[in-house]
Amino acid sequence: MDGNFFRLQVKTGNDSNEGTVTFETVSTRSRANSYERSDYEDTIDYFAVYSPALEQTYLVHIDDAASGKMQLRHEPPANNQRVGINWHEDYALDAILEQLSSDKTVARKE
């Protein structure tokens, strides 16, 4: 985009009954007696997340991603919490692409 190349890790988001789309921000590999988890630090720029239940796609910058698992909220929480919530519309594909095309400083990592 505009001469910049962005590395993506594509994930499927799972819609919960709690009004969130959840996706893993680590790679999990099965081993003989355990699992091996590794993050995507220094290997990707964005998670591209598709929610089949909502038929929505999101772009989450690696620097904004939670460690291990991330939730994008599409319904208000039952406890009325408003601070520290990752609202899904802030990561909507169209919104992020518009930011990327208009803001040359969005590419946080070169």
Image: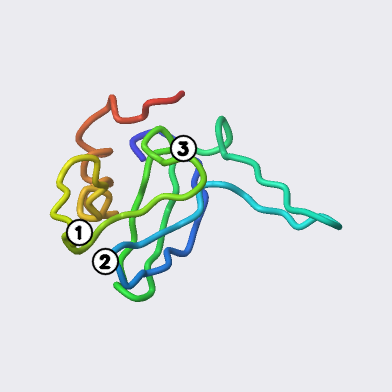
**Distance from the alpha carbon under mark 3 to that under mark 1:** 29 Å
Q: Residue furthest bottom?
A: 53
Where residue 1 appears, x then y in whole percent?
36, 40
Seen at 51% across and 53% down, the residue is 24
Seen at 35% across and 49% down, the residue is 59
Badge 1 element: loop
Determine contact: label 2, label 1, CB under 8 Å: yes
Q: Which mark is residue 19?
A: 2
Q: Which mark is residue 47?
A: none
Mark closest to the chain's N terminus, 3 or 2: 2
- How crowded pointer 3 is (Cα within 10 Å; few <14, some 14-19, many 20+) is rated as many
Q: Tell me which amino acid carries mark 2.
A: Gly
Q: Which mark is residue 77?
A: 1
Q: What residue is shown with label 3?
A: 45
Front: mark 2 or 1: 1
Badge 2 element: loop
Determine contact: label 3, label 1, CB under 8 Å: no
**Distance from the alpha carbon under mark 3 to that under mark 2:** 26 Å
- Residue 44 higher or lower than 16, as above or below: above
Where residue 2 appears, x then y in whole percent?
33, 36
Q: Tell me which amino acid carries mark 1.
A: Pro
When asked about the image quadrant of residue 64, the answer is top left
Seen at 37% across and 45% down, the residue is 60
Mark closest to the chain's N terminus, 2 or 1: 2
- Residue 91 is left or right of residue 66, and the answer is left
When asked about the image quadrant of residue 29, the answer is bottom right
Mark closest to the chain's N terminus, 3 or 1: 3
Q: Tell me which amino acid carries mark 3.
A: Asp
Front: mark 3 or 1: 1
**Distance from the alpha carbon under mark 2 to that under mark 1:** 7 Å
Q: Nearer the viewer, residue 1 or 14?
A: 14
Where residue 46 appears, x then y in whole percent?
43, 43
